[in-house]
Image: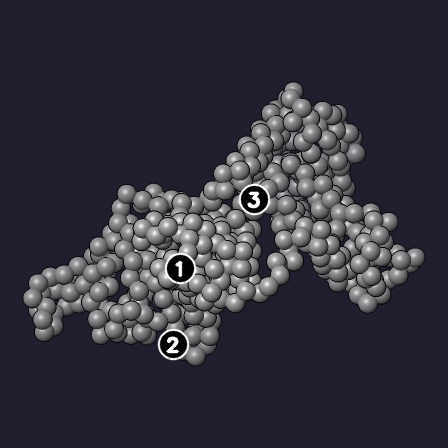
Amino acid sequence: MNTLMQRRKLLILENDRALRRELESVFSDLDVTSGETSEQALAIVRRTEPDVVLFDLGTAREPAVAAQSLELLRQILNISPDTKIIAMTEHDARELAVSAVGLGAADFYYKPLDAGVLSIVVRRALRIRELEEENWRLRERTGAMALEGIIGVSDAMRSLCRAVEKVAPTNATVLLLGDSGTGKELLARAVHRLSGRAHKPFVAINCAAIPDTLLESELFGYEKGAFTGAAKRTAGKLELADGGTVFLDEIGEMPASLQAKLLRVVQERTVERIGGRVPLALDLRIVCATNRNLDTLIGNGTFRDDLFYRISEVTIRVPPLRERQGDSLLLAQFLLQQIAERFNKPTRGLAPDAIRAIQAYRWPGNVRELENRIKGAVIMAEGVVVTAADLGLEDPGDDPEYLNLRVARQRAEAQAARQALAVARGNLSRAAELLGVTRPTLYDLLAKHSIDAAQFGRSAPHAPEAVASTPVSEPGQES
């Protein structure tokens, strides 16, 4: 076995002591940790982030215990989404195993133990984990994002790209929520491109850009003679998207009179042209987007709640540029190169004051505003370097503090410690578990950052409280 595999971490959650020892022996070449209670399991996951968790879910004969096990599985994946969970069950607990996979378990295994077969299952999960890490390391080295055309390296954009990759192969209706200028249409095109409909049409229509009197005919089409000027039968945008994807941008601006007709399209996948009597069956994927708060629109009666539920099978929030730390400068450099080439300008880079200004500015207009400022700067710049003045931004003066790694680490440590103490209500043992550190290490952190634990709750350093334990499910036993 290679040295990389030997360093892999395996967490075994099994209440049967004899079986747990047998499992530890089977996987003695791995870095194995064991746990018996939910609290132990979560603390180990926070501290070690295991590659694989071998989890005995128990038996379907005890619904309450099974429910507790599934909830613990969900919590583990919330803490460490990349961890691969292998759910162990009895042969009569097929539905329990299926539920575990539905929640995110990578695989399942039916007892009794067959060391050879289980070893294959675990090592296959470890190999998948290893390949995923290699893939992300490659992306880090190349600076490439998961989606073509998406520029960014922030955690927010990585999460967004993962969500798009997950939903794209399905036929689920997608609702993209985000401020103007965040690139919602670009993401809608990515959903289409990564789906099985990529070779079919992608049809986009902006519900806010077309007058209400014309929007109906644009969407649904019309028959010859349906109204004055209807000289011939004309297919609507929905019909033109048959087999592919229709993108309804600014869906929150759609007039109430059309929402009922759109609801029928979403529900039945049929459309009737204006003046027509025969419904036309459609095979299309619907992606919608808006910068409006649809809950508010529903509350004041301007948007149908039944339509909202239909178009939001999967809802994806697109973060504004101000929440994408580090992306504004990366985007600026990319746009600068492209726009300079387009206008045949000799612009070669950003001046230091421009870099500081880009990083400090809040970008209320998001990527669209950034692109417009870069375009104007490239056109108007006197030299080969774009300055803050060329961008129409103020130079904040000093370099951002977060470029100092030592300061960033100290701030992150202090923030994490305060959050853990707040969640634990001042219980130092619990806070240490949440942080994945020992109590002495936590004491050092509190002293280093002058944090008073007493402000967060009721416990003191020398009066630790006991942490309640909830047993992991054991076949045939109540917790």
Could you tell me how far apart the alpha carbons at marks 1 and 2 are, in whole angstroms?
50 Å
Q: What residue did someone put label 1 on?
A: 382
The vertical placement of 119 against 337, above or below, is above
Which residue is drawn at the image coordinates 38% and 69% (left, top)?
A: 252
Q: What residue did someone put label 2 on?
A: 302
Q: Position of residue 186 (x, y in %)?
A: 38, 54
Could you tell me how far apart the alpha carbons at marks 3 and 1 are, in whole angstroms?
56 Å
For marks 1 and 2, the one nearer the N-term is 2
Which residue is drawn at the image coordinates 71% and 46% (left, top)?
A: 46
Mark 1, other Cα within 10 Å: few <14 / some 14–19 / many ≥20: few
Query: Which element carries disc 3, helix, strand or loop?
Result: loop
Q: What residue did someone put label 3 on?
A: 104
Q: Amino acid at mark 1?
A: Glu
Could you tell me how far apart the alpha carbons at marks 3 and 2 are, in whole angstroms?
38 Å
Does residue 65 appear in the picture of this structure?
A: yes
Q: Amino acid at mark 2?
A: Thr
Q: Is residue 442 left or right of residue 315?
A: right
Which residue is drawn at the image coordinates 34% and 52% (left, top)?
A: 345
Residue placed furthest toward the bottom: 300
Asked if the residues shown at circle 3 and circle 2 are in contact, with their CB atoms under 8 angstroms apart, the answer is no
Check the picture and name the quadrant holding the N terminus: top right
